[in-house]
Every structure is written in C-alpha cells, then in structure tokens.
Image (cartoon, coloured by chain):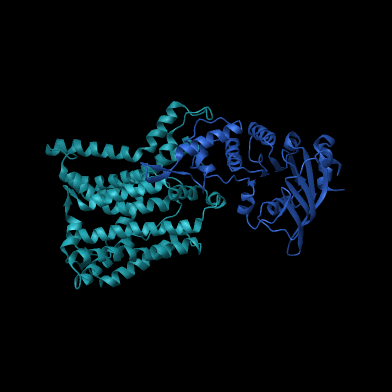
Amino acid sequence: MSAQTSMESRADPTQSRSRQLVLRIAALRAWLFLALLLIFFEIWSRISYGQTFLFSSYNAQSIAIFAVAPLLLALGSTFVIISGGIDLSVGFIMGLAAVIAAHATNLAGQSLPPFAAMLVGIVAGLVVALGPGFVNGVLISKLKVPPFIGTLGMFGVARGVAFLLAGGTTVPVSNEWFAALGNGRFLGFPVVVIITILFVLLMHYVLSQTRFGQHTYAIGANEQAAIRAGINVPRHIRKLYLLSALCAGLGGVLYAARFTAGAAQAGEPLLLDSIAAVVIGGASLFGGSGTILGTVAGALVIAVIQYGLVFINVEPFWQFVAVGVVIIISVLVDQTQRKLGGDR
Amino acid sequence: MSVQSQLQSQEPILDIRSVSKRFGGVEALKGVSMALYPGEVVALAGDNGAGKSTLIKTISGVYGADGGEIRFAGEAVRFATPEAARAHGIETIYQDLALADNLTIGANIFLGREPMRRLFGFLPVLDRPAMAKAAKETMARLDFHVNRLDAPVGRFSGGQRQAVAIGRAIYWNARVLIMDEPTAALGVPEQRKVVSLIQNLKAQGRAIIFISHNLQDIFAVADRIVVLRRGTLAGERKITDTNPDEIVKLMVGG
C-alpha cells in the first residue's frame, strides 16, 4: 500500500528520514525491478544489435501479450493471497475454461451464427470455471480445509476433467469472431491486451476502493478482528475463490481465442509465474498486504525477463533462474521493509 | 449497600441482579449482583477461575445467563449475541485488541461499516477523507493527537493501539466499555497512558468495567472494586475506603 510509506508524525518520532526513504523505495520495488530490467535490455540491445529494445512497438506488444495470461491469474491470486489464502488450482481452471470455451463455441456454431456462438463459448468457459472456485470456497470456509490442500485437490480434479473433456489433445475452434478476439486489434492495440487492461482497472477499483477490498485486507491481517467487526468472513472467502476462478476462466477463454484452440495444459506453466507476480508485486504470503498495481508490475517483470532473454539470445532455461532470483530478492526486500516498518 | 448510596440519585446504566451461569456441572456464577453508574469505573478483581471472564461474557452477549436479570438503562435485556450488546452500546475491548494491523485508524474504526462517497457523481468509492476526519476527531477526544492518519495501526505502539480500539468503541457511542486486562501487554509508560485514557472516558460520562490483575492500576483509576471468588461476590469496596491488602484478602478468601 502506498499508505504504508507515509511516516512523518509526532506519534512516531523514531522514524528517521532515511528509513522513510528506504520504505518508500521498498514499496515500489516491483516498478524499480522493471525499470532496471528495461534499462539493462535497452543497453544490451543498443550495444549488440544497434537498435532499441523498449521503444520498438513490436517488442512492447509482444511483452504485453506475453504478460496477459499470467497477469489474469495473478489478479485473482492477489485477492486470495491478501486474505491469507492461496489458490493452486488456477492453472488448471484456466485449462478447463479454455477447453470448455472451445467445445461450446464449436457446438453452438452448428446452430447459431458465429458471433453468437463465440458469446456462448465465452459465457460457458467463465461459468464452468466458477464451479471449481465454488468448491474451493466451500472447502476452505465451511469445512475449514487449509487453502493449500483444498486448492491442491481442486488442481487435480480440474486437471483431470480438462484432459478428459479435451480427449487428451487440443480442441481446435473454427470461428472467425473468436479468432479476431484473440488476435485482432482495436485502434492498433491487441484486443486481448485491451480486455486485460480494462480488467486490471476493474480489479484495482474493487481492491482499493470498495468495502469488498477493504474487508479482504482486514481478513488477511486479523480474521478475528474482521469477525468481531461483523464481517461475514466465510461468505467473503467463498467470494474470493469465485473471483480467483473467474480470473482464471477469463485467462482460459482468452487463451482459446488467441490460439483458436482449447488445451487442458494451457495454464500449467502459469501457476508459479502468477504467484511469483503477486509476490514480486509486494504481497506477503502471510496475508494482509499487496496491491493490483504491484501485481501488474510483477507480471511485467516476469514477462520482460522471459521475452528479453530470448531477445538477447540467452538459453531459455536462464529465465527460470532469473525469475527465481527476482522472487528471492523481492522477499528479502519485503522482510527488511517489515523490520524497518515495525510491522508484526 | 452503603457504597452505592451516594450514587442512588442516579439510575444505574447497567444493573446485574443475581446472575447465574453454569457449564455442565460447574457453577461458574452463583447469583452475582453488581451495578454500574454512568461516569463510573468499576474494577472487577478476583483470582483465576473466580468468574470474572464469565461475568463479562454474560454481560456482553457471548453467553446467555441461566438465572437472574440484566437491566440496561432501566430495561431488562437479554443479548443473544455480542452484536446485540454492541447495538445497545455495550462494547468489549479484548486483550488481543481485534484491530486489523494493515489498515489505518479510520479504516479500523469503520471496519465492517465503511462510509462510501460517489466519485464523479456515480462511482461509489470508500470515503477515506471522512474516515480520516472521524479518526482524527475521535482520537483527539481521547487526547491522542495523531497526524499519521494514513499509516497502518501496526506501526503504532501498544498504548496507541489500545487507544484506537477504545476510539472505535466511543465513535459508535458505546455507553458501557468492558476492558479485559487493558494494561497487561504494555510497558510502564504505556500503562500510564491507558490509565489516563480511562480517566478521560470517565469524564465523558461513560461507564467502565475494568478487569485487571494489577492492583496499582486498579487503585489509580477505579471508583469501586468488585471482588469475585468462586462465582460469588466476595466483596465490594469504594476505592477510598480500602487498601490493596484488604482486596487481596477478599480475593483469596479467609
């Protein structure tokens, strides 16, 4: 939270100016990482290829498209992680939604015009994604299953069901509207990027400006306090896992549109990337902190690392090393910030 | 009772009449009576297991009484839940404070009932300026002057956090505050600050039940001491008529 950086007060004379500065920088660390990475790749690109990295619209768009799917998963995970939970099932909920969207679009296409068939596919993908999200919420809020275990179970269930429905292969979609959704442009910008930006703004609003967001922070910091304040915590937790599943569902639908095919393994590599984006973005896995804008920066950091290393011809496996190092640095900065800030 | 006779002109805000409570075979409260007047601080003392906790939980709606009667502002009441007690203006401030450390003072005061405003005339957003303003005013009423209205309460000291918890109660017009060991987890300067906080609340005409093991604190702020022993009233003394030795004797019996 930006609020965490404001320190000056009579009430707390122990806060020195240098500490304030450190805290201010720590709060923005994801954006700082991003800036450093971009500077690094820009310099490298100019020296080695004599051309710009960042100011090429091709590169910028590729990075944005790269970031879309992990970012969508990470948006939902931001809420869940702030509340002190974790959702491991998002990757396969995304795959399930992709397969369902592909099947439903094809099926509806037999009797409906292509545009209507696409809408049926989108709605089907999103609605089916809510199923595992609902089960996650009930397991965690009513049956008191730890989020790690409950969503790990749903990870397996969604994975199996998605592969069964896809028949162990990918499900191609033939629908020009659906393909346009995934690969088209509007005013020169990729449609998937525009949709994602709109969704980011919506989630930022919900987390930072509504009671729902405020209660999410409160539950993550002190569940007892939230209960005593009259907040219906179990119901709130169910909504959080539904939201997480909805974000994963949207990721799946956009994946199916972009590749004009649904694949059960669509989100498989994205689970860890999305959690990493949330953590790099400043959220604590203990709950209580994190922001949407931080998560956006975290997702961009990962996308820039992945795309940039390919761009400068480094063996792709170095991506894992680089992302891992950034996560560790990020957590270390977080802990230092906590110590300085006197948070418990 | 002689102790109460001087206050008899006023109606008690809280009147507990031979309340009893049993858990299975254990009689935790065996007909305890006590009264609480506006602007009065009553310390509830007693050894572990004397029934202090059971008594305050019965008052605050956590437990239902098995026998006896609780009258609030002259009316017989039965609180089914802590929310019902709170709605009448009986607020309990727990030892562990029940604050969300990552939220501001204002957000804690309004937690669960946040005010909203409309941005550009249509978009509902949290009314942070109103929360900050209420926080500043409420804390000023407690003689805590804070400038850092946008800092999370986790950054504040134990005594300041205690003040925030009390501030939340008084913002919502609590008439009776039940404080469970409010000084237990604090350092000495902070304990003093909480003691002066209680004196401040008393001056505002609020009634306070104050549980403490610290006889020094009790003698510093309480008007009366009610001593429980094994679920019964062991004694009740005006603070000016007693001394710590007598209270200890009442607590342990004999």
x%, y% of residue A1? Answer: 41, 40
Q: Is residue A313 visible?
A: no
x%, y% of residue A105? Answer: 23, 67
Question: Is the residue B147 above or below the residue A236 in the image?
Answer: above
Q: Residue at x 77, y 37 (%)?
A: B223
Q: Is residue A248 visible?
A: yes
Q: How many marks?
A: 0
- The colour of chain B is blue
Q: Residue at x 24, y 39 (%)?
A: A38
Question: Which residue is the extreme one toward the left?
Answer: A50
Is B20 on the left-hand or right-hand side of A283? right
Q: Residue at x 43, y 58 (%)?
A: A239
x%, y% of residue B170? Answer: 61, 40
Question: Is the residue B127 above or below the residue A316 in the image?
Answer: above
Q: Residue at x 26, y 39 (%)?
A: A37
Q: Which of the pair A106/A147 is nearer the observer?
A: A106
Give residue A258's quadrant in the image: bottom left
Question: Is the residue A40 above or below the residue A143 in the image?
Answer: above
x%, y% of residue A129? Answer: 34, 63
Is A17 on the left-hand or right-hand side of A11? left
Give residue A130's quadrant in the image: bottom left
Give residue A54's quadrant in the image: top left
- The colour of chain A is cyan
